[in-house]
Amino acid sequence: MKPYEILSAIPRWANASADELFASPAWAMPCRLGETTCVLRKDDICRSDTLDLAILLEDEKHILKLSDSEHFPDMHAVWNARSEIPGAILLALAEKSYSSLFQMLENAAHRQLKVVGLEQAADAEEKPSVNLELVSGEEHLLSFSISSSAGLIGQFGSLRYQDVSHVSIRETPLPAEKEYASFVIPATDIASMAPGDVLLLPEVGSVSGKIVVDGRFVVSETGVSPWQDDGLPRVVHGEPSAMTLGELFDLAGQEERQMTDVPPDNSPLRLVRSGAEIASGRFGHLAGQPAFFIDAATN
C-alpha cells in the first residue's frame, strides 16, 4: 500500500469533511505557476498592503487580495506608486502581470476565472477569506488571500491535498500488535484450556512474524496490506504497543523487511480470537521448542 492508500483507509481521514480537510495543518495543494512546479498552502500572516481584485469563479464572486512579490516583476516595479496609476491602467497591468496566477487558480478551483475589476479595500475587508502562500521548494513566490465559499472549500478540501510527510500526520499514533503465530485450535481444546497448559509454537523463529496495525493493516515481509480478521486464534505480544503513521509509511516504502522475531523467554503473550482474549501467559521453551505457557484462560 502507498501512503495515500493507507491514509484513505483510516476513518478519521476517509470520513473527513471538506472543511476539516482544508483546515488540516497538512493541507498542501500541488500546482503549477506557468512552468514552475509549486505548492499552495496556508499562510499564517494576514497581509495588509494588498492589491484587491474582484473576480468571478464561474458565477461566484470572490475578492482576491494580492501582496507584492518580485516574482511578478511588472506589478512589482510600480507597487509603491500604484495609487497614482489610473484604475483602468492598473487593472490592465494586473491582468497581464498575474496571468499565470489566474490560470493556476482556475486549475485549482476547477472553475473559469474572470477578473471583474478593482475592489475597494473597505468592501474586501467585510468578506471572510483564507490566507494562502505559493511556494516552490523553499522559495516563497507569493502571498494572497481569497474570499471563502462552500464551493471553493469543496474543491480545496480533498484528501489528495494532505501532505503525508507533514508532522501532524506522521506522528499520529496507531495501536499495533506483534503477531507470532496463527493456527486452528479445536473448540474443545479452547474450552478446556487452563493455567499450566502449554501450546507449542513451531512457527516462532521459522515463519515470518507480522504486525497488525489499528486492526486495519498488516506489516509483513511482503509489505503493508489491508488486514482482515480470519477468525483464527492468534498468538500476539501481551503488552499494548503503538506505531506512528510515519513509521507505517516508512515500512510500506521499504524494499525489504526483516519480520522474523523470537521474543525473549518470559515475554508476555496473549491468545486472542476476533478481538477477544482466550488465554494469557508467557513465552518459553519446552524440550527445545518455542512454546506458550498459559497462566490464565477465559473459557
Image (tube, rainbow, N blue to C red):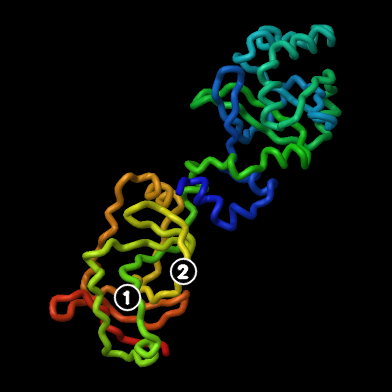
In this rendering, is residue 180 above or below 279? above
Q: Looking at this view, is 41 or 68 the one in front?
A: 41
Name the front one of labels 2 and 1. Answer: 2
Residue under the image location 64 percent in, 55 percent down: 15
Residue 154 coordinates in the image, percent (x, y) = 72, 42
Q: Looking at this view, is 215 or 29 the one in front?
A: 215
User: Real-space Cα distance between discs 2 and 1?
Assistant: 19 Å
The secondary structure type at the circle numbered 1 is strand
Residue 298 coordinates in the image, percent (x, y) = 41, 87
Most distant residue in the left direction? 287
Q: Quadrant of residue 258?
A: bottom left
Circle 1 is placed at which residue position?
269
Residue 36 coordinates in the image, percent (x, y) = 55, 20
Residue under the image location 35 percent in, 52 percent down: 222
Q: Looking at this view, is 169 or 7 the one in front?
A: 7
Q: Quadrant of the C terminus?
A: bottom left
The secondary structure type at the circle numbered 2 is loop
In this rendering, is residue 195 above or below 88? below
Determine crowd level at label 2: few under 14, some 14-19, many 20+ residues with C-alpha closer than 10 A: few
Determine crowd level at label 1: few under 14, some 14-19, many 20+ residues with C-alpha closer than 10 A: many
Circle 2 is placed at which residue position?
229
Q: Could you tell whether 239 is left or right of 90 in the image?
A: left
Type of amino acid at the residue the image marks with label 2? Asp
User: How many numbered dots are placed on residues in this image?
Assistant: 2
Q: Between disc 2 and disc 1, whose residue precedes? A: 2
Residue under the image location 37 percent in, 61 percent down: 211
Q: Looking at this view, is 209 or 294 the one in front?
A: 209
Type of amino acid at the residue the image marks with label 1? Leu
